[in-house]
Amino acid sequence: MITSIKAYDRVADRIRQHRQADSRPVIVVEGPADSRFLRAGFDDEYVIFPTGTRSSAINVTEQLSAWRIPDAACVVDRDFDDEVRSRELSGFPVFAYENADLEAMASKTDAFDLMIYELGSEQKVRDNGGPEAISRLIHMVVEPIARLRAANAAKRWGLAFDKVNVADKVSLKTLEFNLDSYCAALRGESISPPSMAELISVANGSVPLPYVPLCPRRSSPYYRGRDFLAVAGVALRRRAGSCQKAATDAEHLGGVIRAIACKNVKNSPWGKDLRTFFTDLRSSSGARIPRPR
C-alpha cells in the first residue's frame, strides 16, 4: 500500500519550523474555510494552519503546548459535546467560535440579513417580516435538530446526520418542519439508532438532555450553522425569494455567509475577544508580542 505524502505532513512540525522565520501568533484550525475566514478577517495578523478536523486541531495544539511553543492556540467549533468546554476549564489554549460553529456565528450577524436581501427578493423578505422574522422561523426547525445532536453526542447513538438532508424535510411553502419524517430518515440511515419514540421525545423537548451545550457568549438558540443554512436555502426558493435549488444548498450558502461575515469579524465582540485571548496568552508565556502587520 502506497502511503500518501500528506500522511507525512505533520502540521506541528511545520509550525515549529515556520516559527523560526515568523513570530506572528499561530492559530490552528479545522479546515481551509476556517483558514480563509480568519486570514481575510484579520488581515494576516495571525498565521493560520488548517488540520482537517477539530480533533486534529486540538491534537496539534496539544503538541505545540508540549513543546512550549508560545503564542499558539486553536480556534475550533464548540459543537454539541463538552470537549471544548472541558479544555477551556483546564486552561488549554483553545478559543471557540460563537454558538456551535463558524457558520452559526456568522448567521447571528448582519451577514445573514445581507445574504437574504442579496440572494432573495427584497419585497418577499419584507412581506414576511424581514430577516429577523425569517430567522425566527428557521430557529423553529433547527432547535429540535440541535437537541437531537446534543443527545447523540452525549449518548453516542451514532446518528448519521450527514446522510439526511434537512432541506428535504422542510415545507417549501410554509417552512414547517416534518419532524417525524426527519427522525425516520435518521433511523433509516443509522446502524443502531434509538426508537422513533425516543428520538421524537428528545427532539420536542419532552425529556431532558443529559448534556446541554451552551455558548458562553450567550448566543441563543444554539444550533449547527449548516442546519440553519439548509433551511435558509428553502426560504430563498419561495418564501423569501425565487432561487434555484442548486444555488441554495447549505454548502454554497456557507461560503456566501462566511465571505460576508469575515469583513466585520475583526471588530466584532468575538474578534476583540480573540485578540484579548492572544494578549493574555502572550503575557502568561512571557513571549515577545509581535507588531501586527
Image: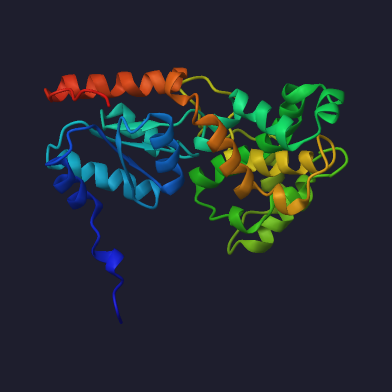
- Relative to the observer, which residue lies in front, 235 or 143? 235
Left or right? Give the position of 48 relative to 36: left
Q: Is residue 43 left or right of residue 253?
A: left
Q: Is residue 191 above or below residue 169?
A: below
Can I make out residue 62 in this image?
A: yes
Q: Colour mode?
A: rainbow
Tell me the residue at 24%/32% (across/down): 25
Q: Quadrant of residue 125?
A: top right
Q: Could you tell me which quadrant the N terminus lies in?
A: bottom left
Horizontal arrangement in the rendering, residue 178 relative to residue 82 (left or right): right
Between residue 78 and residue 149, name the one nearer to us.
78
Expressed as whole percent of the image width and height from the top left, the position of residue 260 reads: 56, 32
Please state which of residues 122 and 5 is positioned toward the viewer in this rendering. 122
Q: Is residue 276 left or right of residue 66?
A: right
Residue 210 appears in the rendering: no
Q: Quadrant of residue 185?
A: bottom right
Residue 82, relative to residue 131: is it above or below?
below
Residue 224: image location, x then y, percent: 57, 39
For residue 268, above or below residue 154: above
Instruction: Provide residue 126's location: percent of width, then percent of height.
Output: 83, 23
Q: Residue furthest front?
A: 293
Looking at the image, which residue is at 64% across and 30% down? 112
- In the foreground, 52 or 114: 114
In the rendered view of the protein, which quadrant contains the C terminus?
top left
Q: Residue at x 81, y 34 (%)?
A: 240
Q: Is residue 52 above or below residue 79?
A: below
Residue most extreme to the bottom: 1
Count of numbered circles in the view: 0
Q: Residue at x 33, y 50 (%)?
A: 56
Percent position of residue 26, x then y? 26, 36
